[in-house]
Image (spheres, grey):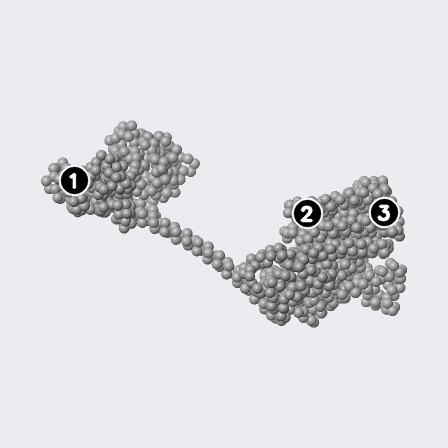
């Protein structure tokens, strides 16, 4: 295929990614961009070109060992999630921007350690990036049928331009803000998209080989089984290769934490810890899917392609051999996706480390202008941009100059071993507070030296100078020092051998030095914060600092990098968080820690510490003091929490008490009103009796007829008084629950008939009809007969009171509805005025509509009836919708 | 001397009966109203010397009736006596604030009422 067309396709694809990244940046808060699936897929940045092409190569030449790279992460995933949670928590807390930041902070914000980690990462990753470029270059050559020619000028090499484009992409989306801890949704989302693309295309070519070129997996197996070295490819021949396997798995397990791109995506770009829950099953699944067809493509390639074909590229060569160019291009784009995400994320992570942990703290800090935050921000961004370009171009030149026949796989493993040197300080330091900074430095440096001696040196000597003597006989002919068989251990392959010895010395020295030398107080302070996650809740309170510092000085330092507006906003937040006065002049430990963290994103933790330290006067604190202060702060916080809880409870109790008090007051008022009314009601007949008696006494000469009238009045009023007293006591008894209802099974019809005959005489006097309707023959219900009789009598006599003489009709009916019975009593009288509806069941309520001149009755009837019905767990109400008179309804549960 | 006129306003017929009898016997011309609205109606045609006013009555109560009497030029000088079962200090103060001339509480002695009213209007 014409290479220009291919370049055209590549540029088109890159533009598409630019578009996707742009879109994602714009929709950063959208759930399409910000969800657990995007997070999990972006983790698959782990699968680089090494996975995409190299696995097949390894499967074809060395058999199943390709699996170790993926089994490590899959096996260790449950542990990974737990540890990662802790790492994310700490990183968010301390505004960590890279793995270098993380390790240097753990050891007391040690500038040298941050720089050392950066250097190790650059050393480990640049060859790895160059490996990616090599893959692009070689696959480009295969597709365009244009064998690579690196001897020509670089400007004729399309890989160079691709490298530049990748650098532009990374620089553009990776350095939009100076704060390196800010999320870069554009890059993350495009990485997730690429993860889908590379998986789909790889599965595509896998099934193409397995089901189109061959007749399924069994077919390939049956054909390959006759192959001479088949057995070597599919089995462990010995215990030694088992041990090799074991170390390889361990190595890849460490890589998933420590590779800068992995740390960047899983920790720095994590937006929500809950996303881990999704990753725990989806990421291993992704890795397993990726490996389903590897072995079949490898076997297929072995069977169909010539021996001279590079097994790394079987997945491209197989479709090409069959003339399926378009499939090959898709496979190429899949591999290209793997390259882009790996290169972009790696350089991004490395550039942050280079700027924040190496370049700025070592020299550039003084160069920042004191009063121009915008220029400083651009300065920082430019450092990172230059770093990105330098890294990618550095990797390109590495590839050009060491364009040796190395398999993708071996450089990848070399890279892993170098990065693995961070493991002891990283992991042990996370759980052991004694691990000290000096020990970390000694461990990492020694481990790296051992790696250099046992892996890099012989590798370079062999590959570049073709000198095997060093490997075979060792230096000075000393067999014990042979680089691939140090101290006589000769059964491991070079990579696992180097891994074993480097990690062995590294860990040994780390532990030994930590136990022999104590770190300083700052180290111990951070160690405590990292190891004991309880201190996480202390936040800035966990930072121990003593000395003299002024807010104005710190404010000036912050202004330099954040600008006045952001500084002001951040400080306001800080004051609010700790409830501090805004005009405080002296700064405390919390403000110092807070300011350091604020600057960390922009200039790295080491620089921010140096910067803040330059404007404050710190006094050294003893180790014991650090621990005491920490403990004290922890206690204060928990006491405060306890007090806050108590005070919240008290506030709640007080409000409850207030409410109860108000209710009591209300009851008291009601009681007062009740007594008032009772007194008033009692006084009325008494007044009448007294007045009449006085009149009778003073007027002995009164005519008999009149005298009788007065005496009648006295009798009436006495009766009224008696009824009143009786009712008041009755109601009181019912309301206070002192009277037990005598509930028995009764025939409701009997009770109704009895009530009717009780009022019969009064009704007849006024020629009022009382009709029983809808009666059931036997109606057994449980109730207190006397009381229900009282209610019915009351309602009936009320009805009689309110209907016109002669025309009046009162209907009483009862029926069973589900699990209760309903009695209704309706009349054709004047009805109940709407405004009275609310009050008719109140004590002393007397309707104005009574036809008698002066209301007869105590005003207690309905109130008592209501008490009785409620005593039966029933309801009584007046039907508001009944317009042709009054209708009262009673419901009692049956 | 003209016969004195009294308007008795109360919704308790038995009490009214005793009062009516006594005042008539003492040579008063007696008018009777069952509530405030009836009283106001009567006051449109009659100007009594004194109004004996209950407070708790249906429709228009004693306070409202008093306010009405005091607000109308033709009736505002009529002596008004509250005769009520309400005997709380707050009730009495409310009555006095509205301009009642005397505040008598139930239950009462008929003889005492007679002397109090006589004193008030002579």
Q: CA distance from mark 2 to mark 1?
A: 100 Å
Residue at 81% across, 51% down: A133
The quadrant of the picture occupied by the C terminus of chain A is top left
Percent position (x, y) of residue A753?
A: 31, 34
The quadrant holding residue A122 is bottom right
Residue A14 image position (x, y, % from top left): 76, 45
Which quadrant of the figure has residue A544? bottom right
Q: Residue at x 66, y 66 (%)?
A: A614
Does A409 appear above or below B60? below
**Residue indicated by mark 1:** B4
- x, y percentage for residue A27? 66, 45
Q: Residues within 10 Å of mark 2 (few under 14, many from 20)?
A: many
Quadrant where the N terminus of chain A sits is top right
Label 2 SS = helix
Identify the mark nearer the N-term, 3 or 2.
2
Residue A237 disc label: none
Q: Chain of mark 3?
A: A
Q: Which residue is mark 3?
A: A141
Is A2 displayed left or right of A356 in the figure? right
Q: Visible in this render: residue A549? A: yes
Q: Which residue is mark 2?
A: A25
Res A223 quadrant in image? top right
């Amino acid at each position: 295929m014409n290479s220009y067309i291919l370049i055209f396709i590549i540029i088109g694809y890159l533009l598409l990614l630019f578009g996707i990244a742009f879109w994602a940046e714009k929709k950063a808060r959208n759930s399409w961009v910000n969800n657990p699936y995007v997070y999990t897929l972006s983790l698959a940045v782990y699968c680089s070109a090494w996975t995409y092409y190299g696995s097949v190569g390894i499967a074809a030449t060395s058999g199943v060992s390709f699996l170790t790279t993926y089994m490590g992460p899959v096996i260790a995933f449950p542990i990974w999630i737990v540890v990662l949670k802790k790492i994310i928590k700490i990183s968010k807390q301390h505004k960590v921007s890279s793995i270098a930041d993380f390790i240097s902070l753990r050891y007391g914000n040690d500038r040298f350690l941050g720089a050392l980690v950066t250097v190790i990462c650059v050393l480990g990753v640049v060859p790895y990036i160059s490996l990616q470029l090599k893959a692009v270059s070689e696959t480009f050559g295969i597709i365009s049928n244009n064998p690579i020619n690196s001897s020509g000028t670089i400007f004729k090499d399309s890989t160079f331009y691709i490298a530049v484009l990748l650098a532009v992409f990374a620089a553009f989306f990776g350095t939009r803000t100076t704060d390196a801890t800010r999320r870069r949704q554009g890059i993350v989302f495009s990485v997730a998209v690429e993860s889908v693309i590379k998986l789909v295309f790889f599965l595509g070519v896998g099934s193409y080989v397995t089901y189109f070129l061959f007749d399924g997996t069994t077919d390939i197996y049956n054909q390959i089984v006759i192959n001479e070295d088949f057995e070597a490819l599919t089995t462990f021949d010995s215990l030694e290769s088992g041990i090799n396997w074991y170390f390889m798995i361990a190595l890849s397990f460490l890589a998933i934490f420590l590779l800068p791109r992995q740390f960047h995506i899983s920790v720095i770009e994590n937006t929500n810890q809950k996303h881990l829950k999704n990753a725990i099953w989806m990421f291993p699944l992704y890795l397993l899917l990726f490996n389903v067809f590897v072995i079949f493509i490898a076997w297929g390639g072995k069977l169909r392609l010539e021996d001279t074909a590079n097994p790394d590229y079987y997945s491209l060569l197989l479709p090409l051999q069959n003339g399926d160019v378009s499939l090959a291009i898709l496979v190429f784009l899949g591999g290209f996706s793997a390259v882009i995400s790996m290169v972009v994320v790696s350089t991004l992570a490395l550039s942050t480390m280079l700027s924040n942990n190496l370049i700025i703290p070592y020299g550039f800090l003084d160069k920042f202008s004191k009063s121009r935050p915008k220029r400083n921000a651009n300065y920082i961004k430019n450092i990172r941009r230059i770093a990105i370009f330098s890294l990618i171009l550095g990797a390109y030149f590495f590839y050009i100059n060491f364009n040796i026949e190395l398999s993708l796989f071996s450089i990848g493993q070399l890279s892993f071993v170098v990065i693995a040197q961070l493991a002891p300080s990283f992991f042990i330091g996370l759980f052991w507070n004694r691990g000290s900074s000096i020990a970390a430095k000694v461990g990492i440096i020694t481990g790296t030296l051992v790696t250099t001696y046992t892996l890099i040196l012989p590798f370079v000597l062999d590959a570049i100078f073709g000198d095997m003597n060093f490997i075979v006989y060792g230096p000075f002919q000393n067999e014990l020092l042979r680089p691939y068989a140090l101290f006589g251990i000769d059964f491991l392959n070079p990579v696992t051998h180097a891994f074993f010895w480097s990690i062995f010395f590294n860990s040994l020295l780390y532990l030994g030095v930590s136990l022999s030398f104590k770190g300083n107080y700052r180290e111990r302070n951070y160690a405590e914060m990292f190891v004991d996650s309880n201190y996480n809740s202390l936040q800035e309170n966990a930072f121990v600092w003593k000395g003299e510092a002024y807010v104005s000085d710190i404010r000036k330092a912050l202004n330099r990098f954040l600008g006045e507006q952001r500084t002001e906003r951040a400080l306001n937040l800080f004051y609010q968080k700790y409830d501090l006065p805004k005009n405080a002049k002296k700064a405390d430990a919390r403000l110092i820690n807070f300011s350091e963290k604020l600057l960390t994103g922009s200039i790295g933790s080491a620089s921010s510490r140096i910067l803040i330290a330059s404007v404050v006067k710190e006094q050294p604190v003893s180790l014991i003091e650090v621990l005491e202060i920490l403990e004290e702060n922890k206690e204060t916080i928990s006491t405060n929490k306890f007090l806050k809880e108590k005070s919240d409870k008290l506030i709640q109790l007080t409000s409850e008490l207030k409410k109860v008090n108000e209710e009591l007051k209300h009851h008291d008022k009601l009681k007062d009103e009740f007594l008032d009314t009772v007194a008033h009601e009692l006084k009325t007949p008494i007044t009448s009796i007294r007045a009449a008696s006085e009149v009778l006494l003073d007027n002995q000469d009164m005519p008999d007829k009149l005298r009788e009238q007065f005496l009648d009045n006295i009798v009436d009023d006495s009766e009224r008084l008696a009824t009143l007293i009786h009712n008041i006591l009755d109601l009181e008894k019912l309301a206070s629950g002192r009277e037990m209802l005598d509930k028995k099974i009764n025939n409701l019809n009997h009770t109704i008939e009895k009530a009717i005959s009780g009022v019969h005489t009064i009704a007849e006097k006024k020629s009022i009809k009382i009709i029983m309707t809808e009666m059931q023959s036997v109606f057994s219900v449980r109730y207190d007969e006397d009381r229900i009789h009282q209610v019915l009598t009351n309602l009936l006599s009320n009805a009689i009171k309110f209907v016109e003489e002669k025309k009046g009709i009162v209907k009483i009916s009862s029926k069973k509805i589900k699990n209760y019975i309903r009695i209704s009593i309706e009349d054709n009288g004047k009805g109940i005025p709407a405004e009275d509806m609310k009050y008719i069941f109140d004590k002393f309520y007397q309707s104005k509509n009574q036809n008698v001149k002066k209301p007869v009755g105590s005003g207690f009837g309905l109130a008592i009836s209501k008490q009785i019905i409620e005593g039966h767990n029933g309801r009584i109400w007046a039907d508001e919708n009944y317009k042709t008179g009054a209708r009262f309804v009673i419901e009692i549960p049956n | 001397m003209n016969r004195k006129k009294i308007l008795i306003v109360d919704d308790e017929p038995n009490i009214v009966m005793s009062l009516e009898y006594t005042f008539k016997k003492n040579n008063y011309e007696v008018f009777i109203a069952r509530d405030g609205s009836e009283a106001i109606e009567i006051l449109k045609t009659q100007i009594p010397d004194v109004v004996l006013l209950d407070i708790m009555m249906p429709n228009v109560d004693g306070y409202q009736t008093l306010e009405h009497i005091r607000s109308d030029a033709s009736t505002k000088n009529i002596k008004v006596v509250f005769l009520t079962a309400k005997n709380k200090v707050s009730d009495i103060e409310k009555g006095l604030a509205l301009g009642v001339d005397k505040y008598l509480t139930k239950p009462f002695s008929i003889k005492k009422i007679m002397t109090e009213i006589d004193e008030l209007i002579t």
